[in-house]
Amino acid sequence: MNGPSELHVPLDAGGPVTALVYGAHDPRHSALILAHGAGSGQHSPFMVGFANALAALGVETITFNFPYTERKRRLPDRRPVLEACYRAVIDAVSVAVVSDGRPLFIGGKSMGGRIATQVAAADPERPIAGLVLLGYPLHPPGRPAERRDSHLPAVGRPMLFIQGSRDAFGTPAELMPALAPVAPPATLYVVAGGDHSFKVSKAGDQAAVYEDVQRTIAAWVHLKAQDS
């Protein structure tokens, strides 16, 4: 299996960041940008595993590092920097990967998914076919009143939320009311027994859990790509 190809994305402020393009083994006319979470970059086992699996399922997948990760810093950049980086990656991918007009989806793990929703909500004209959100951080752990959902109705594209049933950043039960006003209606897939990264108890089959999630993502992307 060939590894991903590199794509260097210039930013208006600071040096470029690196994106990795995982080419689909069986392309089905769609591509997905997945941003990493706050605590780990695009080379984490979670991000690499999901990118490879989705590519094998026919979804060309692009990951990238936010500037703080690229510079090997631990503290995430401020919101404007994160959003500007994500927009730059979308622009670069639109030219280098999907210039043939294929549908482009965006999303990410935890913080990366939240930034994707903010970028989409702020720019309703940007050609985004849908969003894939892995462990959406509805609120910080232990602080359910600090919600991060007021912008979701402004996203205006199909959204797939994959949420563990015991996610400390927001359980599916907490998330459902936030999705009620969203149009088009969002899709919520619950990982039974899963935490913020969909990890289940030791008695569970973690590989099977991840495979179910990955197949769900690929099927949803293929379906929405046909609708776009």
Image (cartoon, rainbow, N blue to C red):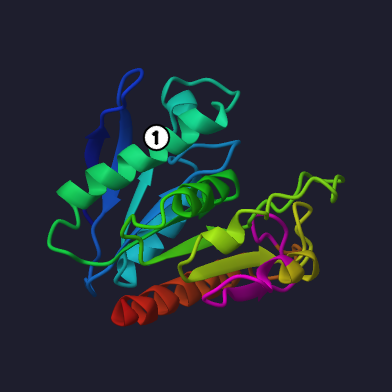
Which residue is located at x 27 percent, y 33 percent? 9
Position of the N terminus by quadrant: bottom left
Q: Farthest residue in the left direction?
A: 100
Which residue is located at x 24 percent, y 75 percent? 28
Decide if residue 137 is on the left or right side of residue 84: right
In the rendered view, tell whether residue 121 sits above or below residue 66: below
Residue 213 in percent (x, y) is at 54, 71
Position of the C terminus by quadrant: bottom left
Which residue is located at x 51 percent, y 68 percent? 159
Tell me the quarter of the picture where residue 55 sits: bottom left
Q: Tell me the residue that label 1 is attached to.
A: 85
Chain part drawn in magenta: 178-199
Residue 65 visible in image: no
Tell me if residue 189 is in the magenta stretch: yes
| Callout 1 amino acid | Cys
Decide if residue 6 is on the left or right side of residue 106: left
Q: Residues within 10 Å of mark 1 (few under 14, many from 20)?
A: many
Residue 86 in percent (x, y) is at 40, 41
Magenta stretch: dominant secondary structure: loop
Tell me the quarter of the picture where residue 125 sits: bottom left
Residue 67 in percent (x, y) is at 43, 26
In the rendered view, tell whether residue 82 sits above or below residue 143: above
| Secondary element at image label 1 | helix
Tell me the quarter of the picture where residue 52 sits: bottom left
Residue 101 in percent (x, y) is at 17, 64
